[in-house]
Amino acid sequence: MDYIGEHLVPGKLGHFFIYLSLVSSLVATLSYFLSAQSKNIETATGWKKLARLSFITESISVLSIFIILFYIIYNHLFEYKYAWQHSSLSLEFKYLLACFWEGQEGSFLLWSTWHCVLGLIIIKTAKKWEAPVMTIVSFAQFCLATMIAGLYLFGSKWGSNPFELLRNSGVLDNAPAMHLEMDPSKALRPDYLSFIKDGNDLNPLLQNYWMVIHPPVLFLGFASSIIPFAYAISGLRKKQNGVSSAADWIKPALPWTLFSVAFLGTGIMMGAMWAYESLTFGGYWAWDPVENASLVPWIVIVAGVHTLLIYKHTGRALPATYLFLILGFVLVLYSTFLTRSGILGDTSVHSFTDLGMNAQLYLLLYLFLWGTAILTAKNKDQKIYFSVSAIILLLLSASISIPAIAFVSVLSGLGALCYNIFSQPSLVKEEEKGSSREFWMFIGSLVLFLSALVIIAITSVPVFNKVFNIKIAMPEKIAHFHNSIQIFVAIIIASLSAIAQYLRYKQTGFSFFRKKILIPFILSVIVASIVLMFGEINYTQEGVGFMAAIWIAVALSIFTIISNFSYIWLGIKGDIKVAGASVAHFGFGLVLLGILISSSKKEVLSNNINGIPVALGENENPLENLTLIKGLPTAMSKYTLTYETDSVHPKKQQWYYNIRFQSKDGKENFVLKPDAFINYKGNEGLMANPSSKHYLTHDVFTYITSLPNPEKMTDTTKFKNQWMKEGDTAFYSNGFIILEKINSRDSIPQPGFDPTDSATAATFKVYSKYNTTYTTDKALLINKHGQLESYPDTVFAEGLVFKINQVDGNRAEAAIKDSNSILKYITLKAYKFPMINLLWAGVLITVIGTLMSMIRRIYQNKRSSLKA
Amino acid sequence: MKKMHIILLVLIAVSIAVLISFLKVASSYDSFANAKENPGKFMHVIAKLDKTIPLEYDQLKDPNFLGFHAVDSSGTVVKVVYRKGKPDNLESSERLVLEGKYKDGQFECNNIMMKCPSKYKEDMNAAQKNIQSTTNSK
């Protein structure tokens, strides 16, 4: 049957390119693999040619899928489920991109697109590493292509196709009006599309500019983590074949690892900025499982950068390097599983919705672990042994659906891989010296790695619950639990990053070290003492011990900042080309300091019982909400807040509230505009977006937590009538009202009025019991052609409504209503975050430093390849 | 034994100690019946908002106090008190993860996590609403 108004061409093209990308990535994988395996140069080149051709085809396909999907979203082709589900007509252009990656399909596509870009760079630059590295990248591309394939194979569906039509997706199946004769069992009516007037819209929380940029950067970070992984696997393979010396792979791997650190780190922190600006948990980091899942691979890859450097300079720490770089990517896959399988449902506030692809996500992890374990096996016997175990375990997991078996199977793959890593003979036999740089760098990497393991173990509790059928839940103060562990990690890492640069590889003379580090050390002691003495870092909520730890960490992060900054002159004589590490560690010190100060000195501004009297119960600790009545200035810590006006978005139920903050000393006066979606898509309740005022030293941050309940708004009070002269007084529940003036006019200079018509305006002055006064003069009574029309006036802050019913000479009958229900009010929370800019600046500097190191390593590699 | 091996062992021991201490402070997913039996014990209860009993929330009196009734999977209804204001989307959530302890006849809640109906179901509802409105307007 033909349906009216459908655009089927883009979808057909899209399907074609998805299949093309499936096939071409598979061909690329196989031919790269054969090229890497082949001992004969000619056959190797032949396979490589085919592989390149397929990978370029693959890249074109992925790019085309990307463009077609965006075309569908951009043109609001709601016949496609993806466009209907994630976008709407009222969405601004910039958010069309955000809705592109709101869904799992779009974000997989983003990931895949980055793989293509990185893959093309590898083809251009990697030379002899191209074939082994690209084997792995192409295989990852094949796996990602299956995620958006939507194919039915072996009795189950593989992947979720973004080009699925709405009418095939099941959404319309139960809607009678969409079907012929209003009967859902009958066929769809041909003009069904004319009833689909708008899409489902993008989740309001994602309608934030950070959501346009955060996912692409984060996914570039995720995508890039495969390159160090692929190099490590290739290194592990090559070495065992005896083709090449192991040291070779680390040269090209080093800049790629730095790249990964820079972009994954930026992506994570952009997510933190989004959380800070758009979510309402009052902060940038909440130790939410989704956040942890992306932080953990980053920490492990950072550890990998450091062991790479150790190996490059001393030949030590090779197994650890393999482990960290391999695990970094495996953890990316694992975090993909965690966030997309829906397993975090009860512990995370923001994971993807379950698409029923758990088996496929599990398989992704399984194939990569066992596949690389087989690839890197020492000899033929072991290869066969591993392959057989992998197949048996997979069949076992598939046939008996007991989570514990699946869990053990995937873990054995990891075990096999680790066996390959650690079964190599170590290169350097004698022990490293305690005075060497590598000794302390290695300890730092170990601490980072183990802290990552602790975080991921805690984050994996829902997995353990499922596997072992237990019911462990997070402790009462999970954030504090993480903080109280990570503060010690921060202390160790800060001390190490402060001193390690002043140590030499292999061995450091004590007098050399002392001479160099003396100045930065003394400077740090002075600065740290000043900061601790006058900084008022008094975070006593969690006891004295925790505060002491914060103080030590603050002092040490200052040491890191100063010592790395000084090293640029003391250590490398201002040579900016080699200053990448110093700059990055300097920035890292700022990050630590920013985190410590902004979280320990975070202030709740709305923690206040001025204004509206609040019933204080026992244990009512965090009184963080404050209610503001429209027009009534309310005291809140050092500010006076006034809810001035509100407005609504022309196209959606998004309300903006203008709240004026005036500091009591008169120095600050600004308006914040938090907004909220009210009863969004018919769901009762509100979704709030915060607003903040940025100062160099702190942010003032506020968001709406509650609005009046419309059910309580039914007005039952009546007007009270009273004849009043000028100067007469009327009383109401909160004070009294004086009728100041009655002003009548006979001729009204407006069209449509006769000369005989008249208007009367009354001026009321309200004296409330809080000593505030309000004057208002908008109550009107118009006598038009003998018809009386009364226009009421209101004083929202006092809940008063005024009317004039009739006028008789100098007397007027005033009607006054005194009711809470006409009150317009909002409830909000407000915080002050000090030194948050230190954190953002630190992130930026760390990233710049990392990129500086990356560029230097690229040049170094170019030079050494020219020499060779 | 090398220095590094000793350090490695110490670090691993510390990590294990941390994980054990986590298990010690960890709570569990439980039912209201168990919460009543163990007053004062922190736990997570997965429940639903009982919409038959009205919420208690008056911003003008106290913007921090929220009282409501919740029913867990075994059907036990308990009054829940939350003293951090009213979370967004409380009414529209289909499932609540309540973290807190039972005390003096009510469940004192520290944190509420709202689980909204799955996107898919929501779409179905939205589609149906949309369609109903178009047919009504005819």
Image: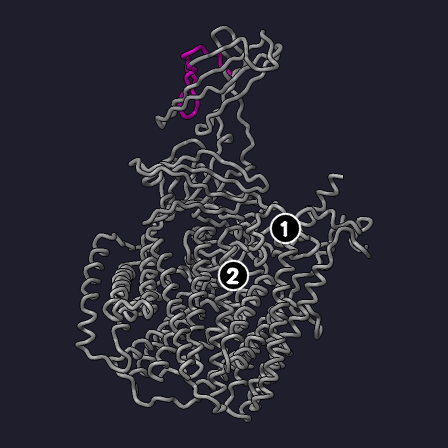
Relative vertical location of residue A133 with respect to residue A79 in this rendering, above or below: below
In the rendered structure, find residue A791 and report the number of the disc placed on it.
none
Asked if residue B28 lies left or right of residue A633, the reply is right
Picture residue at 45% right of the left edge, 70% below the top: A297
Residue range (magenta): A720-740
Taking A238 as reference, is B107 above or below it? Answer: above
Task: Give the camera-side residue of A94 and A463.
Answer: A94
Position of A175 compared to A162: left or right?
right
Q: Position of residue A810 (x, y in %)?
A: 47, 7
A290 falls in the magenta region:
no
- Tell me what residue is drawn at x 43 percent, y 81 percent: A865
| Amino acid type assigned to the residue bearing label 2 in the image | Pro
Per the image, the residue denoted by label 2 is A216
The answer to whether any part of residue A499 appears in the image is yes
Name the residue: 57% across, 15% down. A750
Q: Secondary structure at mark 1?
A: loop
Q: Is residue A724 magenta?
A: yes
The image shows residue A441 at horizontal and vertical percentages of 32, 76
Mark 1–mark 2 Cα distance, whole angstroms, equals: 23 Å
Mark 1: few/some/many CA within 10 Å (<14, 14-19, 20+): many
Q: Residue A200 got which mark? A: 1
- The type of residue carrying mark 1 is Asn
Could you say which is closer to the camera, residue A345 or residue A75? A75
Residue A454 seen anywhere in this rendered image of the structure = no
How many other residues sit within 10 Å of disc 2, few (<14), some (14-19) or many (≥20)?
many
| Principal secondary structure, stretch drawn in magenta | strand
Element marked by disc 2:
helix
Q: Is residue A460 left or right of residue A499?
A: right
Indicate the position of residue A807 as horizontal and vertical percent values.
52, 10
Q: Observer-nearest residue: A133 or A806?
A: A133
